[in-house]
Image: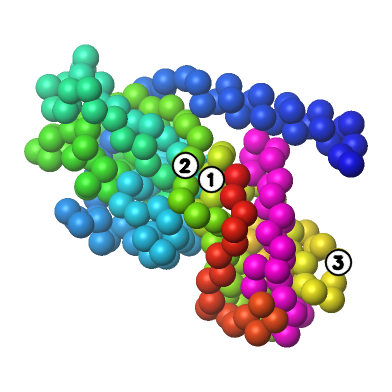
Amino acid sequence: MESPSLLLLTTLLAFAFKASVAQWTPAFATFYGGSDASDTMGGACGYGNLYNAGYGVNSAALSTALFNNGASCGMCFTITCDASKTQSCKQGMSITITATNFCPPNYALASDNGGWCNPPRKHFDMSQPAWETIAIYQAGIVPVNYKRVPCQRSGGMRFTINGNDYFELVTVANVGGSGVVSQMWIKGSKTDWMVMSRNWGASWQSNAYLNGQSLSFRVQTDDGRVVTADNVAPYNWWFGGTYTSWQQF
């Protein structure tokens, strides 16, 4: 049974998450990656092939003000072009994207003339297919409004294990609900639960020797919800393998 203090913390986090998804906020958006979004694969969050990760082409790179040093990886936003400020919008259209990459600042350019992702600007560098849902190609950059929304995913969470002996680097993808992993734990079939630490983006690390053991994962999202995926990776798992659970938020 959860302790009263844990229940209170979970309730407060859930309340804060609901408050964060309720507000429209102004920003700007550009696009990258080509008409097939092929150049959006990979990225600073570490998801690699975004189709395999469950995210597809509806993705965006976030500016420093939104990326939060990788803690926003997996977050979902609904974006709409602000037709009150430009003629380049596709009227009545919106798109929901997943944060999968970082748009770095370019201090050689002014923030209002090419340095679109310079702090403190809130900016989305969207995949071209996502962009063309809300704005015309020729515009290049448009003012938008965005709000954080819950993530709708198909299937369970996916865990990709890289690293080597005594170093498991686990990237968790296709996370529903809040979409943002705030803490992870790992458990071998011969160990207790062990806290993992964020390595970068959506990748978490453990420094235990877990070869030859089936692996379980416990995932907490930033709204305080926790899901346990037991025995996701079999005892003969390998580095470079991806293992899909039935569990989801």
The residues colored magenta run 209-233
Q: In the rendered image, which residue does mark 1 sit on?
A: 176
Main secondary-structure element of the magenta-colored stretch: strand
- Residue 207 is labelled as none
Q: Position of residue 36 (x, y in %)?
A: 20, 57
Q: Is residue 139 left or right of residue 239?
A: left
Q: Position of residue 165 (x, y in %)?
A: 69, 83
Any part of residue 200 in sight: no
Bin the neighbour count of mark 3 within 10 Å (Cα to Cα): few under 14, some 14-19, many 20 and up: few
Check disc 2 and give the amino acid type.
Gln
Q: In the rendered image, which residue does mark 3 sit on?
A: 192
Bin the neighbour count of mark 2 within 10 Å (Cα to Cα): few under 14, some 14-19, many 20 and up: some
Classify the position of the N terminus by image quarter.
top right
Residue farthest left in this picture: 138
Residues at badges 3 and 1 in contact (C-beta under 8 Å)?
no
Residues at badges 1 and 2 in contact (C-beta under 8 Å)?
yes
Label 3: element kind: loop
Q: Residue at x 26, y 43 (%)?
A: 130
Q: In the rendered image, which residue does mark 2 sit on?
A: 152
Q: Residue at x 59, y 50 (%)?
A: 248
Q: Residue at x 22, y 22 (%)?
A: 92
**CA gap, disc 1 to disc 2?**
6 Å
**CA gap, disc 3 to disc 2?**
32 Å
Label 1: element kind: loop
Q: Measured along the vertical axis of the image, is residue 126 above or below residue 44?
A: above
Mark before the other along the chain sequence, 1 or 2: 2
Label 2: element kind: loop
Check disc 1 and give the amino acid type.
Gly
